[in-house]
Image: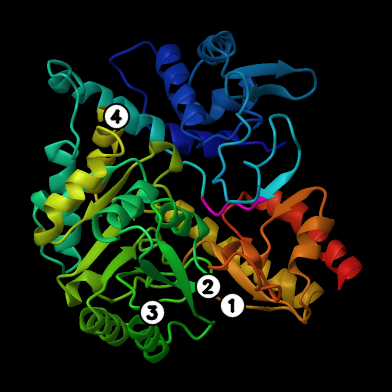
């Protein structure tokens, strides 16, 4: 159980709001800190005596605020521990990103650690973002609520986001979706006929591949390794297979972690144009840089035949369930029809949340970025110490390590683990098998979970190697 000191709490609370009683201000501010994840579930709050001195408030004020926290379900008293912060009802289990492993993560109440998922938790302050969006919602309540392409304010915010990155974009080129996968699926429907070939690097993100295959596309793989995309091999495959489209992940490739430079992006786009193929660029990980902000242009800056798909799931929160398509204007009609064949729009409230996040310039929070960087480096240190014959990459961004194993035992490792769910390398293969020399290790989870998972992985590997 963690504990927050009175001085640390005072810094988080800020100045007393003189417009309301002090006990009420303290209660509402503490409740917000707990709800927004700045004070974690299970954290011991300062004793009333310590809080009096640090907060310069009376004992009665502190006691009354703590009592209201308990009555509201945001705290509980424990003998010998004092007042403990909590989420009413406790944090929900699950909520992880499902991969095609035959299931959807741990069942409710399970203590299994899910390392099939590579996505961070909601950042601190998300509840405040929702409260701000609720205040804006009445402006839309007088309408029917259908915005098949997205509300105009969010479409403009996304257009500005691309323009600021060096890719001039108008709001008419933006289509809002329920995550990146529907964006990939809509792109596939717009440009691929049944049975036509879509090229994809292997390994690749399996859910995007499933979204394209579900429409009847035939996927063909071209290898990618830790050095990055092989443009010449890709060009050869584009022409030999007659591919009509290609799934492109130039930004912190999932799972390999590579970042393509501008020269590579330009060459790739040119080869797609020569082959008459449309590129479907998955930018889900574009804002997940950890060491230094990449100085590269969006790949769509190099061709008018590239459809870009983005998502708020990794950079903001998966619970928003929002993604988008940035389409070339000559494909806008086809893209809109394909998107509307799937559903009639996404919730207005979440669109307002994302609009405000984009307009504030917020992508991955500094706190989340620092946590991911620390987890990555810690995990690399653990592998170097305990599994020195493994060869992980060191990605400059993204959410996972792609590890080369000294023996082709990836599936055996995943099967051996009982307390950890792990995706074997074959999960990321375009043809669904192979890559037994590889395993993906996400580092987006809380450090406490990773510290439990790594010893289990180390022990399991010793048993199957």
Q: Which badge, 4 or 3, is on the more N-terminal residue? A: 3
Q: Are marks 4 and 1 in contact (CB under 8 Å)?
A: no
Residue 39, compared with residue 243, is above or below; it is above
Location of residue 79 with respect to 50 vertically, above or below: above
Residue 118 magenta: yes
Alpha carbon separation for disc pair 4 and 3: 40 Å
Residue under label 2: 256
Disc 4 secondary structure class: loop
> In percent of the image, x 37 and y 45: which residue is there?
179
> What's the CA distance linking mark 1 and mark 2?
8 Å
Please provide percent x and percent y for residue 258.
46, 76
Q: Residue at x 77, y 80 (%)?
A: 388
**Mark closest to the chain's N terminus, 1 or 2:** 2
Magenta segment = 115-119
For mark 4, what is the residue? 347
> How far across and how far down the image is residue 234, in percent?
39, 84
Mark 3 neighbour class, 10 Å CA radius: few under 14, some 14 to 19, many 20 or more: few
Please report contact status of discs 3 and 1: CB closer than 8 Å, yes or no.
Answer: no
Residue found at x 23% / y 22%: 135
Q: First in sequence, mark 2 or 3: give its number.
A: 3
Is residue 220 left or right of 465 when viewed as pictured?
Answer: left
Disc 3 from disc 1: Cα separation:
30 Å
**SS assignment at label 3:** helix
């Amino acid at each position: 159980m963690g504990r927050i000191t009175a001085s640390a709490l005072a810094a988080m609370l800020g100045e007393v709001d003189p417009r309301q009683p002090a006990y009420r201000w303290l209660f509402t501010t503490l409740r917000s800190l707990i709800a927004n994840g700045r004070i974690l579930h299970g954290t011991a709050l300062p004793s009333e005596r310590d809080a009096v001195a640090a907060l310069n408030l009376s004992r009665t004020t502190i006691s009354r605020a703590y009592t209201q926290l308990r009555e509201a379900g945001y705290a509980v008293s424990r003998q010998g521990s004092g007042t403990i912060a909590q989420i009413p009802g406790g944090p929900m289990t699950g909520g992880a990103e499902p991969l095609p492993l035959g299931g959807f993560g741990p069942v409710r109440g399970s203590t299994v650690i899910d390392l099939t998922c590579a996505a961070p938790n909601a950042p601190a302050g998300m509840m405040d973002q929702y409260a701000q969006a609720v205040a804006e919602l009445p402006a839309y309540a007088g309408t029917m609520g259908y915005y098949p392409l997205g509300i105009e304010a969010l479409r403009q915010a996304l257009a500005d986001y691309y323009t600021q990155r060096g890719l001039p974009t108008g709001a008419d080129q933006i289509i809002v979706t329920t995550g990146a996968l529907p964006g990939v699926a809509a792109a596939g429907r717009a440009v691929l006929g049944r049975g036509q070939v879509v090229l994809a690097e292997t390994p690749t993100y399996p859910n995007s591949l499933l979204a394209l295959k579900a429409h009847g596309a035939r996927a063909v793989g071209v290898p990618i390794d830790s050095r990055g995309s092989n443009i010449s091999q890709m060009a050869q495959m584009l022409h030999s297979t007659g591919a009509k489209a290609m799934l492109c992940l130039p930004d912190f490739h999932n799972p390999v972690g590579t970042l393509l430079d501008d020269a590579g992006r330009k060459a790739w786009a040119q080869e797609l144009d020569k082959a008459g193929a449309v590129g479907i660029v998955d930018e889900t990980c574009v804002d997940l840089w950890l060491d230094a902000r990449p100085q590269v242009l969006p790949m769509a800056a190099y061709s008018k035949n590239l459809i870009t798909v983005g998502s708020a799931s990794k950079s903001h929160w998966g619970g928003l369930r929002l993604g988008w398509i940035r389409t070339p204007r000559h494909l806008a009609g086809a893209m809109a029809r394909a998107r509307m064949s799937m559903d009639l729009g996404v919730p207005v409230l979440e669109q307002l949340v994302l609009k405000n996040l984009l307009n504030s310039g917020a992508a991955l929070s500094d706190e989340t970025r620092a946590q991911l960087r620390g987890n990555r480096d810690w995990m690399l240190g653990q592998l170097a110490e305990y599994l020195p014959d493994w060869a992980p990459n060191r990605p400059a961004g993204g959410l996972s390590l792609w590890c080369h194993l000294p023996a082709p035992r990836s599936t055996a490792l995943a099967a051996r683990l009982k307390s950890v769910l792990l995706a074997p390398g074959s999960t990321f293969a375009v043809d669904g098998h192979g890559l037994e020399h590889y395993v993906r290790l996400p580092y987006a989870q809380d450090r406490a979970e990773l510290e439990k998972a790594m010893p289990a992985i180390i022990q399991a590997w010793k048993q199957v190697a």
